[in-house]
Image (cartoon, rainbow, N blue to C red):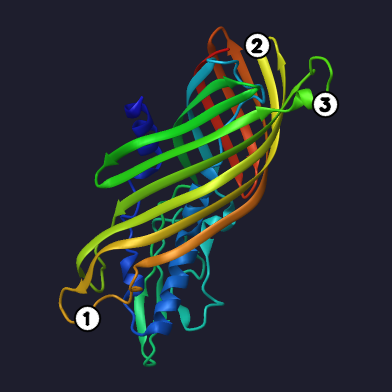
Amino acid sequence: MKKLLLLLFVSFIVHPIFSQDVLSLFATNGPQAQQRSLEVFRRYSTPLTQSYAWSTSLGWMYTARPHKPIGFDISVSTAGIIMPDNALYFNVDDIEGVRVISGNKNLPTFFGSNTQETVIGIKNDDGSEAVIPASKGINIDFSVLPSIKIGLGVGQNTELIGKLFPKVEYNGIVIKMWGAGFKHNIAEWFFNEKSPFDFSLFAGYTQLEGQYPLDNSQIAPVVDPGLLMFETKGGNFEAMLSKTLPLLTIYTSAGYVYTKNETKLKGDYTLLNLTDESLNIPDDEILDIYRLQSWKFTAGLMFKIGLVYFNGDYTFGWSHQINVGLGLTMK
């Protein structure tokens, strides 16, 4: 199972991650210049942190009907985020002290072009200008996050749900995720007899951690480029309505996502040629703190033959979001 998850993740997105030069953005001098560098980095990396934040909120449920006591399901699912066009490029026209010196004024984000050559200028606090090659993208307009999901009925129309991406390592990249939640069917509150549908409330928590090795700066090499590290934590709250038919379950839900992502560096950013100087990086090495707070709406289908089921759904939110899963279930 772990090898399958690794194959899914590596096949789509891992191999090109952060082979781009992002450290050169911080080859500047002064606190104001540091803020300019941080803003450029945030605009470059925000689509990636957004995709992490949304991915962790997908794939929790394929039916509002909880398992009976000791009933369970186990599945492998993949959350896919298709990037909107405005997540592939950004510009710096409105950042004071930052300009495009040569190349296209629309700079690639993390998911943007991997061939575009652009040079930007960032004003230093002493009035000089740092000339920096803009970071390239990976030229992939989607991201994926596979996971294992387990559901267990505990009685009283309640089910416990767990999600897991076991810790995997690949070429210095490490990623892991876990989540836990529960759903409770409240349809019986509205009907004296058996309800014609199921209606559940869900609450869950997810934590995702990732680290990626960085290439050294092209214009200001450092002792150890180290790692770019992400930590995403957040809650997901949903109300789901579903109708179970022979071989088919139709489901829809509305929910709210709250997620916080912290992006930081871990390395030795002392300059190789000037051992008494370092890159203009914050002392705590935190580059960005991103918060997602948004409503989402989902609709999907689950097909079940015997103990085997397949589900797929679409979520309307920041972008096109799709989740598919394959698993085993027992009432």
Q: Earlier in the sequence, mark 2 or mark 1?
A: 2
The numbered disc on residue 190 is 3
Q: Single out the mark in the foreground, 2 or 3.
A: 3
Q: Secondary structure at mark 2?
A: loop
The type of residue carrying mark 2 is Leu
Q: Residue at x 32, y 38 (%)?
A: 167
Question: On screen, 204 above or below 272?
Answer: above
Residue 247: image tag: 2
Question: In percent of the image, x 84 and y 18: which residue is there?
Answer: 192
The Cα–Cα distance between marks 2 and 1, rounded to whole angstroms, is 66 Å
Numbered label attached to residue 277: 1
Labelled disc at residue 134: none
Which residue sits furthest top?
Answer: 306
As rendered, which of 12 and 74 lies closer to the eye?
74
Q: Is residue 211 left or right of residue 72?
A: left
Residue extending farthest to the front is 156
Instruction: Determine the secondary structure under disc 3.
Output: loop
Q: In front: 180, or 144? A: 180
First in sequence: mark 1 or mark 3?
Answer: 3
Question: Tag 3 or tag 2, which sits nearer the N-term?
Answer: 3
Residue 320 on image: x %, y %? 61, 43
Query: In 3D space, how far apart are the residues under numbered discs 1 and 3 (Cα atoms)?
Result: 68 Å
Disc 1 crowd rating (10 Å Cα; few below 14, some 14-19, many 20+) is few
Label 2 CA crowd tier, 10 Å (few <14, some 14–19, many 20+): few
Compared with 203, 305 (above or below) is: above
The spot of residue 266 in percent (x, y) is: 28, 61
